[in-house]
Amino acid sequence: MSFFVAILPILLLFVLMMGFKLSGHLSAFLTLVLTILLALFAAPDTSVATVGWSFVEGTLKAVFPILIIILMAIYSYNILVASGKIETVKAQFTSFTDDKGAQVLMLVWGFGGLLEGMAGFGTAVAIPAAILIGLGFKPMFSALVALIGNTVATGFGAVGVPVTTLCNETAPGGVATAEQLCEVSSFAVLQLSPLFVILPFIILMLTDRKAIGKNICLALWTGLISLGVQYACAHWLGAETPAIVGSIAAIAAIAVYARLFLPKPSGKEERKPIGAAETFKAWSVYLFILLFILLSGGLFPPVSHFLKTRLVSTVHLPVIGSVFKFAWLGNAGFMLFIGATLGGLVQGLSPRQLAVTLAKTIVNLRKTVITLISLIAMASIMNYSGMIAAIAGGLVAVTGSFYPFFAPLIGAIGTFVTGSDTSSNILFGKLQAGVAQGLGLEGSDANWLIASNTTGATGGKMISPQSIAIATAACEMDGKDGEILLSALPYAVLYILIGGLTVYFGL
């Protein structure tokens, strides 16, 4: 299959969403139909059975766990709305300063990065965007800044799964050493280093274009602290902790900066103090979620192993030779459900009210279900029919010695198609390692090029149709997928360009 045929589904998706401004679920479905036709009639040796089982694999991956996680993330926010505790959360987010920029940065860069580091799979877009709307920000703005903020942390999302997977995919024997994990992790942070300052600045400017001086200072302060902490964690500890610890450091940095340099909240004397008990109730949903995700994640291996080896469903997919496994207890969606439900009970909701809230959330996500199943099934069919390999191979053939500059673009394409940094690393990690060998790169230089895949993949996350579908669901913007994609595209292009330059000149 040629590069030009293989890239047609991606081009069609852009044209339908941005040119014809079709809704996300309709654009995704039509693109899936084209992908199936191309796989059947333009891809050599691709049978109907291959396409069929690829579709089944994509559907399973879409539902377990991605759709479940998105559903539970929005369910957790809807619990706060139903209990009325969202007002307490709003009051606390505005209590440390009246500065809108600091509030937005705290949510999408700090809190969003923490959610990404713990759970991933869309939680860092859905929850911050929903809270921003609760604070009074416009839906389009909320969706855009949530997507921009959910980038650099995704390489280390879900307790470091993407980078860990990348290292295992490229390591001899399929098991990476601790040294390689630390080196690739630290290289990924270095390649993204300019973006630690640039992205907070963009978020602040989108919030308030007039406060340029303040925006520069706050972006430098927050970004450099995030960068330093993430690099230290990556260099000495590996892939599990950079996003989590770095985001906590960013939250602290923004709070300190606001206390020292930003205007104090107006009318402070009129505000009723919020006690510890009320604070616990308001934040109980997210506190329980954090607790359960940390218990089930890689930070506590015995607990994680127990949960991930109990109640595991296994589906063997013939023809494509794949095995799909889903741990009903050891996944982020279940942790979100348990944490949110317990938090809702603490906030005073009855089991019946919680059930009604969950049912309403499911109904409101019906179009998102179509979008995500179509997109992830499309990615699976493109993979098994050779389309993704043809796209990557075409880029390698055209770029030649300038390949390192374009290496992050390949990672970004992987995330755009699959919606997952981890999937992009599975698809193209070995390709990056093979090109490194072909260019005569060894040791640290080879790891530098390998790390570029996750560098680009984090940028592709910003405009991934799956991420945009999550944003439209969280912000209740059905049919606005194309508008969100169009608004985020320039920032994604800048992101990938900067990643390419740092990879090329850092080699």
Image: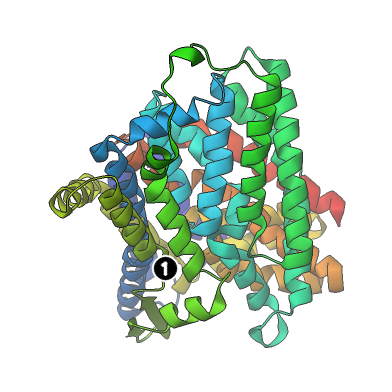
Mark 1 is surrounded, within 10 Å at the Cα level, by few (under 14), some (14 to 19) or many (20 or more) other residues, namely many
Q: Nearer the viewer, residue 377 or 336?
A: 336
Image x and y of residue 363, in percent = 18, 48
Picture coordinates of residue 504, whole percent (x, y): 81, 52
Judge left or right: residue 243 versus residue 360. Answer: right
Check the picture and name the quadrant holding the C terminus.
bottom right
Q: Residue drawn at (71%, 67%), measured in percent from left and top?
A: 238
Report helix, strand or loop for mark 1. Answer: helix
363 w.r.t. 95: above or below: below
Can residue 423 be seen in this snapshot?
yes
Left or right, 343 with reference to 233 = left
Q: Residue at x 66, y 60 (%)?
A: 453
Q: Name the quadrant containing residue 292.
A: bottom left
* Residue toward you, 455 or 337: 337
Q: Residue at x 48, y 11 (%)?
A: 267
Q: According to the image, label 1 marks what residue? A: 380
Nearest to the observer: residue 478 or residue 68? 68
Residue drawn at point x = 70 percent, y = 42 percent: 497
